[in-house]
């Protein structure tokens, strides 16, 4: 599948935003009002900013962004519609949490937990958009939704660690969340890659055309002399070596992020802050590369009609 | 509404096409006729970028592939028109976030409303058959309408109230009708010729059917015309004196 930059930016940036918002929601739920107003406002602005940037960028790939409001109507059947509704609805408990956490100190736990639940629900819906498509075997996979959730949590937790260090509020629990998140993301991706590499393609060109009883089928002539939308959108192919290189970048970035998270435990405070910021950078590179590969390695069944032997 | 209509009732109208792969010669008349009709019909026009240049590209609602099946001289060429199959379980409709994609309850035609489509392209991802092509000039998705603006048009003569592709086909490889009515000619044809679904494993339940190419009556390799094409022996020891002489001359001249 063609990796659209707006969708990659949307899913990684809003993912990190939802991860961060969920974690400060839980922090508020367990600790009550924020101890530092500057820290609270900064984390809220970063979280809601990332979410908003992501949501806006997701409309850039639409043919008619001005009609985007119509996407709130089909929640009964469409995961994309559900994602849109839950994403926007999350702003209600998020803004109430922001107010109670920073100023009023009333019902912090309620709005905090509700925000965290809505964040998880939004990312779940994002994952399901892909995991519900029967046309792409690399997406209709039980690990796709967990990977989306874990990447949101891991990048959000790493961001929280860095922000906490900037405001001299580093705690062991932040390291545990970020390190465990990045380690789980790494393990899930390794298991996922092994799984998609070892399972056979679901369908063959003989099945797609239904003329396999005549013998092995191959494309003789394309229906058109130039490219078409299907070839450009679904026909994107990444070389095996190129994919392996990018997979190594994901593994190295996540491992690098993990190491810098752990380093914050042993380094003096100024250096620990630098390490936490570097951890964010590594985690971000890992997440964006992973998301790019998620699209580039996805093989759509329609390619069978364009001569691919199996998909 | 992207929720699907209940089409389980006996005799439910299911308009669709039946494509005879045994007859199709790959002339592309259906594809051209489709483009011509639909660039002025429902959700028109179908604009091509660079139409007279080196890379003409734009939405076409019907594409004719050519495949080769089998090996060597016995391989068979199969021309394969591909368009929307107006499935009974179309995931392209259920994934649509706006309700722009819908399946008509009255005849099962799957359509896109060009006034409410946001151009998210998710429906094209959900279709295994490549039936939907995005029109970036309009920012909306385009697909086969089964010529909904022809088939009910009473200003037309009865023989013209069929999809443009069916009207254009010079060999009679395309049939149009109600596949939900077991007594219809088209349903009988499907039964008689053992028409099949594309990728039935995916459970989209296509309405359109394909009629398989008939088996060849003889192996091409045994046909006299093919036998005469057998490569010439290189050693000059066979045949009559005259044959050997002309072979020698042929070798010298073509050497």
Image (cartoon, coloured by chain):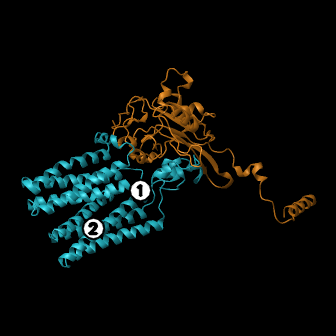
Q: Which residue is mark 2?
A: A280
Q: Quadrant of residue A63?
A: top left
Res A3 → quadrant = bottom left
Pinpoint residue B82: horizontal percent, then vertical percent: 53, 42
Badge 2 crowding class, 10 Å Cα cut-off, few under 14, some 14 to 19, many 20 or more, is many
| Label 1 vs 2, first from the N-terminus | 1
Q: Is residue B91 above or below residue A170?
A: above
Q: Label 2's element?
A: helix
Residue found at x 11% / y 63%: A36
Residue A252 sits above or below residue B8 on the image: below
Figure colour of chain A? cyan
User: Residue A1: image x %, image y %?
Assistant: 43, 55
Q: Which mark is residue A195?
A: none
Does residue A141 appear in the picture of this structure?
no
A263 or B183: which is nearer to us? A263
Residue B107 appears in view: yes
In the image, what residue occupies the spot 17% across and 53% down?
A: A115
Q: Please give the name of the residue rendered at 57% of the width and 38% of the height, measured from the top-left corner.
A: B31
Quarter assignment of residue A264: bottom left
- Pointer 2 indicates a residue of which chain? A
In front here: B249 or B227? B249
Query: For the residues marked 1 and 2, what is the alpha-carbon distance in whole angstroms?
Result: 23 Å
Q: Position of residue B167 (x, y in %)?
A: 58, 30
Q: Position of residue B22 (x, y in %)?
A: 61, 40
- Label 1: which residue? A3
- Few, some or many C-alpha atoms within 10 Å of disc 1 (few <14, some 14-19, many ≥20)? some
- Dot in front, 1 or 2: 2
Chain B drawn colour: orange
Query: Do tag 1 and tag 2 residues touch (Cβ < 8 Å)?
Result: no
């Amino acid at each position: 599948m063609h990796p659209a930059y707006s969708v990659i930016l949307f899913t990684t940036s809003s993912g990190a935003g939802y991860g961060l918002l969920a974690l400060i929601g839980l922090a508020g739920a367990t600790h009550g009002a924020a101890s530092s107003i500057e820290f609270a406002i900064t984390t809220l602005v970063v979280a809601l900013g990332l979410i908003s940037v992501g949501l806006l960028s997701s409309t850039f790939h639409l043919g008619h962004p001005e009609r985007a409001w119509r996407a709130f109507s089909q929640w009964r059947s469409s995961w994309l519609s559900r994602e849109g509704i839950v994403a926007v609805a999350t702003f209600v408990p998020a803004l109430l949490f922001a107010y109670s956490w920073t100023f009023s100190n009333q019902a912090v736990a309620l709005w905090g937990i509700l925000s965290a639940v809505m964040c998880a629900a939004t990312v779940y819906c994002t994952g399901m958009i892909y995991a519900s498509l029967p046309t792409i075997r690399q997406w209709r996979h039980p690990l796709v939704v967990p990977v989306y959730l874990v990447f949101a949590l891991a990048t959000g937790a790493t961001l929280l660690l860095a922000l906490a260090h900037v405001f001299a509020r580093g705690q062991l629990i932040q390291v545990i969340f970020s390190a465990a998140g990045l380690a789980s993301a790494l393990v899930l991706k390794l298991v996922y890659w092994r799984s998609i590499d070892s399972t056979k393609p679901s369908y063959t060109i003989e099945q797609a055309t239904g003329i396999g009883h005549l013998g092995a089928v191959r494309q003789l002539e394309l229906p058109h002399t130039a490219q078409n939308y299907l070839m450009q959108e679904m026909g994107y192919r990444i070389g095996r070596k190129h994919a392996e290189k990018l997979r190594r970048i994901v593994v190295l970035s996540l491992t690098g992020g993990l190491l810098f998270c752990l380093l914050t435990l042993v380094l003096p405070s100024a250096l620990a802050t630098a390490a936490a910021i570097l951890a964010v950078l590594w985690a971000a590179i890992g997440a964006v590369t992973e998301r790019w590969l998620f699209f580039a390695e996805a093989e759509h069944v329609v390619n069978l009609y364009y001569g691919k032997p199996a998909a | 509404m992207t929720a699907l209509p209940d089409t389980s009732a006996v005799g439910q109208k299911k308009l669709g096409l039946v494509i005879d792969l045994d007859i199709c010669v790959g002339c592309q008349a259906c594809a051209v006729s489709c483009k011509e009709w639909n660039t002025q019909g429902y959700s028109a026009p179908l604009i091509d970028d660079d139409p007279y240049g080196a890379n003409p590209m734009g939405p076409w609602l019907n594409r004719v592939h050519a495949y080769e099946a089998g090996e060597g001289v016995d391989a068979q060429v199969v021309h394969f028109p591909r368009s929307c199959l107006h499935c009974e379980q179309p995931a392209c409709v259920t994934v649509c976030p706006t309700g722009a994609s819908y399946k008509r309850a009255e005849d099962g035609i799957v359509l896109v409303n060009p006034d409410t489509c946001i151009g998210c392209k998710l429906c094209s991802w959900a279709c295994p058959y490549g039936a939907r092509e995005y029109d970036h000039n309009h920012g909306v998705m385009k697909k086969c309408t089964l010529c909904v603006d022809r088939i009910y048009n009473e200003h037309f003569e009865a023989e013209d109230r069929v999809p443009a592709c069916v009207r254009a086909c010079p060999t009679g490889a395309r049939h149009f009708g109600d596949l939900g009515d077991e007594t219809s000619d088209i349903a009988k044809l499907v039964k008689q010729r053992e028409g099949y679904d594309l990728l039935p494993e995916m459970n989209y339940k296509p309405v359109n059917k394909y009629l398989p190419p008939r088996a060849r009556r003889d192996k091409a390799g045994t046909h006299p015309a093919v036998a005469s094409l057998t490569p010439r022996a290189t050693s000059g020891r066979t045949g009559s004196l005259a044959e050997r002489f002309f072979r020698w001359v042929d070798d010298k001249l073509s050497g």
